[in-house]
Amino acid sequence: MLKINYKQAFLLGTLPVVLISAPFAISGYKVDLLTNLLINIILVTSFQLITTTGGWSLAHIPMMGCGAYGTALLSGGLGIPFWISLPLSALTAAAVGLVISYPLARTKGFAFFVASFAAGEAIRLCWTRFKIPFGGHKGLTVPAPVLVENVAWLDFEEAVPYYFLTLTITLFSLIIMYRLNSSRIGDSWRALASEEKLAKSIGINITKYKMLAFAGGSFFAGVAGVLLAHRLWAIEPRQFGFNATLYLLVWVVFGGSHTFAGPILGVVTLTFLGELLRPLVEWVPMIYGAIVILILIFLPDGLESLPNKLKSLR
Amino acid sequence: MEFIGQTILNGLMTSSFYALIAVGLSLVFGVMHIVNFAHGEFYMVGAYTVWVLFAKMHWPFFLAVAAAIVLVGLLGLISERLVFRQAKGNILSGFIMSVGLVFILQVAVVKIWGLGKMKPVPAAYPQILDFGGISTSWQRFIVIPATIILLVALWNFLERFKIGRALRAAAMEPEAAALQGVSVKKSAAVAMLLGSAMAGAAGALMAPIMSVHPYMGHSVVWTAFVVVIVGGAGNIKGTIWASLFFGFLTTIITSLFDSTIANLVNVLVMLILLAIRPQGMTGYAEN
């Protein structure tokens, strides 16, 4: 059971207030920044579903791209409304994830990193190479979602309504992923990450559970991709390149990957740090690269391990 | 007939290039258990060295290549000392550190030489080489003898010299090797020096053929990884065989369709192979 002390209760109480009032207190550009942060929170948490099985997939950003391209084709190309295209596109990402996870689940260590990287790049190459239907280098355009026409506060072309749409979907996604993570399935994932042979010997189907984690993670990465595409209104293959993968890795390494909150902590902290570093934007990849190396040397379990480390010092 | 001859020549040139870049990667993994993503950036630094020394300062081509080999080897040595040693054999940490290194090197190169225009490197040997209808330029042909010389040198080093044998021992049985007095740290450093130097050599030799820019290592490291996976990580003979296989596959598919399709087919072959034989073509299995 969850044990909540006063401090945590205070946090849980203020968080909704902050999340709801924030977009009214800041300017338009910063609302989009918050929306982006929420999308990235879905992304890192879905990545964590895969890392709990012990494999750090390098195809996760392309999986997000599958969701984005899915919705671009479904709602942009075929005119299917956002509400149907969202789950369909996420399922597309999950299906692609399921297919590539079959060979990937049979590898580990070196082969897993490299094979997932190659698979992700191959997907990206398809978007560039096949101009029909993916639009090549120029990519595709995506319309803003419409729920009811001509209602100002439901006009999702505006930043604030879109923020609340994203907030709602983010909360739902996080709840589902949290439940999944603390269910029996989540226990099995952790079991096969720490003691694969033991897990196998007590009857856990390793390949099946790894594929399930990969498909589940890809589903929510797809959700993040859909939300991103409908806010940017245009997508191109370059957005889902290796730079984005680096940021994902840095967020998760920085926050730590052993608790549910670790990756979220990482992405929130580094997003605010990134805002402070705006004047140095060209240097940011180098700074992130240095951060990730330093964290791995001096704080290998990430930010989430800091409280325990400080406690043991005392 | 001419088409077949031309394909064989092109295939040999592509295979040599793949072998040059993949063998270093395989060696580094075998000894240090580091999945080095920065290998492609080492290759890129090798190409930049030739651009600076040969194209701008007009050094003789082979002197510039030799300088690139030494320089990139040292860069690898420094990275091992400052970064990879701290991973302490943890594959995940080492791999993520190398990704960090990729971006540090890329930004460094952009900051020093700028992003803007391509860095044109003129061919040092633009003369056409003609084998009765089958033709290529000397500049492209050179990669074949250069690769053979470098691989034979590496092979002799690993077979004949005491430190080379120690390196292989450390790759096979680190604990037993340590008990026999082999310094695991020292062999890691030597492996990194040699592996990076090979990447530098590849970049240097390809600089007049490829376009030189800060992100050129990315697509190369991708192919190199496919080759290493299929050949067996840490297995140098297997890596050379896989280089030949993929070199010819890429050449044939490129001449039939285009190079993007060839890349896709390479990955597909790797994924299918992993699905059927997760231990790789040569039967190497990770513990």
Image (tube, rainbow, N blue to C red):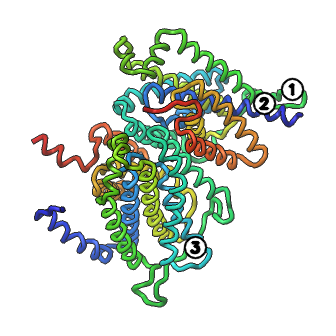
Instruction: Check disc 3 and report the residue beneath it.
Output: A74
**The C terminus of chain B sits in image quarter:** top left
Q: Is residue B219 positioned above or below A22 on the image?
A: above
Mark 1 crowdedness (10 Å alpha carbons): few <14, some 14-19, many ≥20: few
Instruction: Check disc 1 and report the residue beneath it.
Output: B131
Q: Residue at x 46, y 88 (%)?
A: A148
Instruction: Describe the element under mark 2 as helix, strand or loop.
Output: helix
| Same chain? Circles 1 and 3 | no
Instruction: Describe the element under mark 1 as helix, strand or loop.
Output: strand
Dot placed on the residue nearer the N-terminal end, 2 or 1: 2
Please report contact status of discs 3 and 2: CB closer than 8 Å, yes or no.
no
Q: Chain of mark 3?
A: A
Distance from disc 1 to disc 3, alpha carbons, whole Å, reads 54 Å
Q: Residue at x 39, y 85 (%)?
A: A153
Instruction: Describe the element under mark 3 as helix, strand or loop.
Output: helix
Instruction: Check disc 2 and report the residue beneath it.
Output: B9
Q: Position of residue B250 (x, y in %)?
A: 70, 40
**Number of numbered discs visible in the structure rendering:** 3
Q: Is residue B179 positioned above or below A267 on the image?
A: above
**The N terminus of chain B sits in image quarter:** top right
Label 3 sits on what residue type?
Leu
Label 2 sits on what residue type?
Leu
Q: Position of residue B193 (x, y in %)?
A: 48, 23
Quarter of the view holding residue B84: top left
Q: Chain of mark 2?
A: B
